[in-house]
Amino acid sequence: MRSCNVSSSQPATIDTLARPLPSVRRLLLSAVFCCISVLAFPLMSRFFSLFTKSSQPLIQHLGPPTTPTALAAQEALKSSNAVMSAQETATVASGCFWGTEDIYRKAYGNGKGLLDAKVGFIGGHESSKNPSYEEVCTGRTGHAEATQIQYDPSKVSYAELIEFFYRTHDPTQLNQQGNDRGTQYRSAVFAHDQNQLDIAKKVTEEVQKKHFDPKGKKIVTQLEIRKKEDFFPADDYHQQYLINNPNGYHCSTHKYWW
């Protein structure tokens, strides 16, 4: 049994024996500080990043897809006369949703297939409905920051949008993108039916083989089916954030990697 560290010249009273040991107090304070740091880091990281110089990527000319599945889908669109639905939905998560939305808009807006895009949250616990940005930042709701894209399937295929997703972030980083860390910044594709999931898996395999096997890296992107209705839009402040704030924070991994 550990000594109470009471001086031999001073009798051990009930009061002195009941006091917590200094080392125990230090441990308790350290534990409290660590808990506060873990919870506050995501919000503070984003807050201070607003005062850093923007690292928005130079959007170069978007070349054709590089994976067989996306290329085949693109060629099929060119030669097909089939009547397609007017609108489809794709939902992806690749870190800070401001940059994800912005880079898709720049690549596929202006008549190139993107009809609309919203940022929000998806992939959370069943008990966490319509979470706030602050709640998601704690990591406790399980949601990812995501972008939900409405697109014209007669102009751009789901396969091409998924290859573009891999092309514009680092899918080998687990639960982070750049300086943004936490499960809410995870790389994920949220398919809305089995067909989308099958396409996403195929494109993932092809991207891994072509672009990451040569580098000795492994894609850690999460692939799962979620209903479109499981997506909760973020507040208006976050929508088209980089259009309204051109010098705002942009995650360093949101750029063309090939």
Image (tube, rainbow, N blue to C red):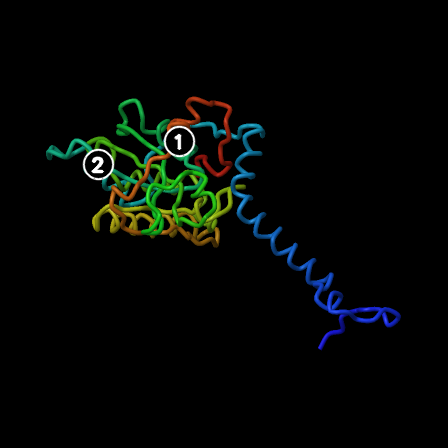
Label 1: element kind: helix
Image quadrant where one finds the C terminus: top left
Q: Earlier in the sequence, mark 1 or mark 2?
A: 2
Q: Amino acid at mark 2?
A: Glu
Within the image, what quadrant is residue 65 found in? top left
Give 27 or 148, whichever is nearer the viewer: 27
For residue 2, above or below residue 253: below
Q: Residue furthest bottom?
A: 1
For residue 225, above or below residue 99: below
Let me know if residue 258 appears in the view: no
Give 153 or 187, whichever is nearer the viewer: 187
Residue 170 % position (x, y): 45, 44
| Relative to 155, 56 lies left or right | right
- Numbered circle sitting on residue 103: 1
Q: Amino acid at mark 1?
A: Ile
Give 113 or 194, whichever is nearer the viewer: 194
| Relative to 183, 114 lies left or right | left
Q: CA distance from mark 1 to mark 2?
A: 19 Å
- Numbered circle sitting on residue 190: none
Please tell me which residue is depicted at 61% across the width and 56% down the height of the picture: 31
| Relative to 66, 5 lies left or right | right
Within the image, what quadrant is residue 96 found in? top left
Please tell me which residue is depicted at 45% across the width and 48% down the height of the picture: 139
> Do the residues under discs 1 and 2 have CB atoms within 8 angstroms?
no
- Numbered circle sitting on residue 88: 2
Please tell me which residue is depicted at 27% across the width and 46% down the height of the picture: 191
How crowded pointer 2 is (Cα within 10 Å; few <14, some 14-19, many 20+) is rated as some
Within the image, what quadrant is residue 13 found in? bottom right
Residue 144 % position (x, y): 39, 45
